[in-house]
Image (tube, helix red, strand yellow):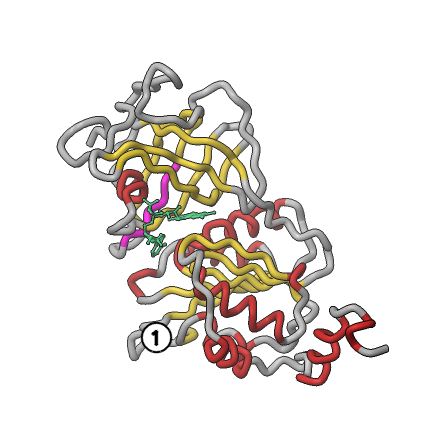
Amino acid sequence: MSSTSGPGRPQHFAAGGAGRRGRNRVARLPRRARLTASRVLTETGTIQLEFQIVDDDPFDFVPGQFVAIDMNHPRYGYRRSPYCLLDGSEQERTFELLIRRVAEGPVSLFLADLNLGDIISFRGAAGHSMIPSKDDTELVMLATGVGVSPCVCLLRWLLASQSRHTIRLFWGLRLVEDICITPELDSLTEAHPDFEYDITLSQPTDRWTGLRGRVTESVPPLLHTVSDKHFYLVSNGEMIAEMSEALQNLGVSRERIYEESFFNHRYRPDREAVAAVEARFVAADLERPIERLARELARFPSSWRGS
Ligand SMILES: Cc1cc2nc3c(=O)[nH]c(=O)nc-3n(C[C@H](O)[C@H](O)[C@H](O)COP(=O)(O)OP(=O)(O)OC[C@H]3O[C@@H](n4cnc5c(N)ncnc54)[C@H](O)[C@@H]3O)c2cc1C
C-alpha cells in the first residue's frame, strides 16, 4: 500500500519518494526514514516497525526518548505524534518502534498501514532519559501495553553497559492475546541475572497462571520495600497517576518516580482510587500516617507551625 494517495488515506511520501521540507507541504517535520521491516506481533494490534534513516543528519538517542512522526490525513488534517524508541543504532542509523494500532488514532493507523520502502518524516530523538542516576538502586518498571517499549530499550542499554541494577519489570496487559516479545524478554532474563519480569493480565483466562489484575492491583502486594527503589511508570496515564500518588503518599520521594504518559494524560484520580492502591501495599518501609503528617507539616514555614 502506498501512503500517498487514495480516498481516506493519509497523504505522505510515496515509497522511495523522500520529499524535502518546503518542496512538499504534506509533512512538516524535517527528517526522513524508510520502513525496512514491519511485524504484526499480536492480532490485537501490536506492531514492531524498523526504520532506516535516509537523511544526512546524525542520529543519537538515550532510552526513554521518542521520535515525533507526522502525516496529513484527508479527514483529520495534519497530525503528529510521539513514539518511544524500542531500539536503535547510532552507527547504522536505524530505529525500531513498538506501536499499538488505535482505532481512533490516525497516526497509529498510518504507521500500521505503511508498506516496506515507504518514507516517513520525523523529528528526534527527543525527550527524557530513563537512565538511572545512581548505580546502586533497584529499578521497578511498571508498564502497560506498548509502554514496555522504552523499558526494553533501557534494559538493553543497562545490559550493554554492564550495570549493577536489580531490575524488575511488571507488564500490564488486558488479554493473553496481547502478549508478545516474550522471547526478547526471556533472553534478557537469561543474559541479566538481576532482571526478572512478570506479566499481569486484567482480563485473564481461567488457565492463566501469571499475575492477575491491573498493575495497580497485582504489584503492590509483591514489593517488600519501596523507599529504596526507583520506579518507572509508563503508558496509561490512569495507572501512572494512581500509582505515583500512592507511592508518594507512602513515602517514596518524587525524584524516585519516573513518569511517561502515552495517553489519558489528564486523568486525575479521586482520593478513594488512590487509597485503594495504597491499601494493597505491604512493604516493610511504608511511611506511617503520623510520619506522613510530620513530613507534610515540615513543608510549611516554621512561623506557620507556631514555633
Ligand atoms: C511521550 C509519548 C510516547 C509515546 N510512545 C508510544 C509508543 O512507543 N508506541 C505507541 O503505540 N504509542 C505511543 N504513544 C502514543 C502515540 O503518540 C499516539 O497517541 C497513539 O499512537 C494514537 O494515535 P494518534 O496519534 O493517531 O492519535 P491520538 O490523537 O494521539 O490518540 C487517539 C486516541 O487514542 C488514545 N490512545 C493513544 N494511545 C493509546 C493506547 N496505547 N491504548 C489505548 N488508547 C490509546 C488517546 O488517548 C486518544 O484518545 C506515545 C505518546 C507519548 C506522549
Residue extending farthest right: 307
**Percent x, y of residue 163:** 68, 52
Residue at the image point whose x is 34% and y is 36% from the top: 37
Q: Visible in this render: residue 196?
A: yes
Q: Nearer the viewer, residue 137 or 278?
A: 278
Residue at the image point whose x is 34% and y is 18% from the top: 19
Q: Nearer the viewer, residue 166 or 243?
A: 243
Left or right of 96? Residue 192 is: right
* Image quadrant in which the N terminus is located: top left
The correct choice, above or below, for 250 with respect to 89 in the image is below
Query: For the residue labelled by badge 1, is the local secondary structure a helix, a strand or a loop?
Result: loop
Magenta stretch holds residue 276:
no
- Magenta residues, as a range? 45-50
Q: Visible in this render: residue 194?
A: no
Magenta stretch holds residue 47:
yes
Residue extending farthest left: 7
**Percent x, y of residue 174:** 34, 66
Left or right of 264? Residue 88 is: right
Left or right of 161? Residue 171 is: left
Amino acid at pointer 1: Trp
Residue at the image point whose x is 74% and y is 79% from the top: 294
The correct choice, above or below, for 218 with respect to 55 in the image is below
**Percent x, y of residue 106:** 28, 43
Q: Which residue is mark 1?
A: 208
**Percent x, y of residue 47:** 33, 47
**Quarter of the image where one finds residue 255:** bottom right
Residue at the image point whose x is 40% and y is 55% from the top: 263
